Amino acid sequence: MSEFFAGLETYLYVVSTGLFCPVMMGLVLLTFWMVFCLGAVLRDFTDRRRGKRAQQETYLRALGAEVALCQAEGDSHLDIRLERLLQEAELRLLKSLDRVSFAVRVGPALGLMGTLIPMGIALSSLAQGNMPKMAQSMVTAFTATVVGLACGVTAYLMSLVREKWVKEDMREMECATERRLREVVKAGESRVEVEDAFSQET
């Protein structure tokens, strides 16, 4: 029985050490991804300071095109089509948060794995009397912890900022949709009144 458990321990140790390179590579890629996301957030911040709202502008163009298409087709279900257009745009905005939000959990998880795996290697080196390898593994372990936590904190802060922007965009898009729908309905009522008046005169 002791040999069986010893085999299980060896198997788990091999699996754990085999995950070392993928975990370290994941942390490296995550740091590059955080730099890319940080650049995107700074670009959006600069655009918003200048009064440019890319998401809102794109939605307004799509809204105008949808209204024009609906009027050309004579579709009476304009409110339903605009509601669907709004929901699709809001869903895209919410999905854009996933590019940053996943790092909030993945960063600390990779950091923890990058800590525990080298610590296991360090303990094994200590048992063999290989002090330099143990010291190197411990340095790697603590470095992985710092990198993972730093990525997680950075991603969390960026997600807070992006959530605020997404809520603002969604609110403006909802207001624009309601305003455009009322304009179309009012224009339709005015046209009906003119037609009724013209028919009464004739």
Image (tube, grey):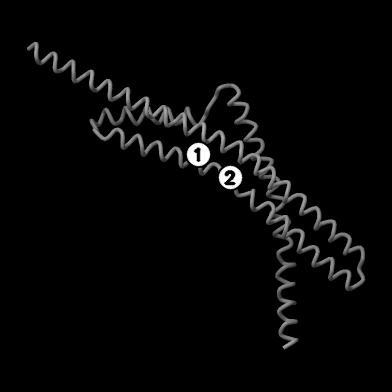
State the image coordinates of residue 191 (x, y, percent, origin top left).
21, 19
Q: Residue furthest bottom?
A: 1
Residue drawn 26% across the image and 28% down it: 72
- Foreground residue, 105 or 29? 105
Question: Which amino acid type is shown beneath numbered disc 2?
Answer: Arg
Residue 48: x %, y % from top left:
58, 26
Residue 31 rendering spot, x and y as whole percentages:
71, 46
Horizontal placement of 43 versus 125: left or right?
left
Q: CA distance from mark 2 to mark 1?
A: 11 Å
Left or right of 93 on screen, residue 9: right
* SS type, badge 1: helix
Mark 1 and mark 2 in contact (Cβ < 8 Å)? no
Q: Residue at x 73, y 49 (%)?
A: 149
- Residue under pointer 2: 99
Q: Position of 149 compared to 136: left or right?
A: left
User: Which dot marks residue 192?
Assistant: none
Question: What's the amino acid at mark 1?
Answer: Leu
The residue that mark 1 highlights is 93
Image quarter hosting the N terminus? bottom right
Which corner quadrant holds the C terminus?
top left
Q: What residue do we see at 68% from left, 51% from top?
A: 107
Q: Earlier in the sequence, mark 2 or mark 1?
A: 1
Callout 2 secondary element? helix
Q: Residue at x 70, y 59 (%)?
A: 22
The spot of residue 124 in percent (x, y) is 84, 71
Q: Looking at this view, is 200 or 134 the one in front?
A: 200
Q: Is residue 53 above or below residue 18?
A: above
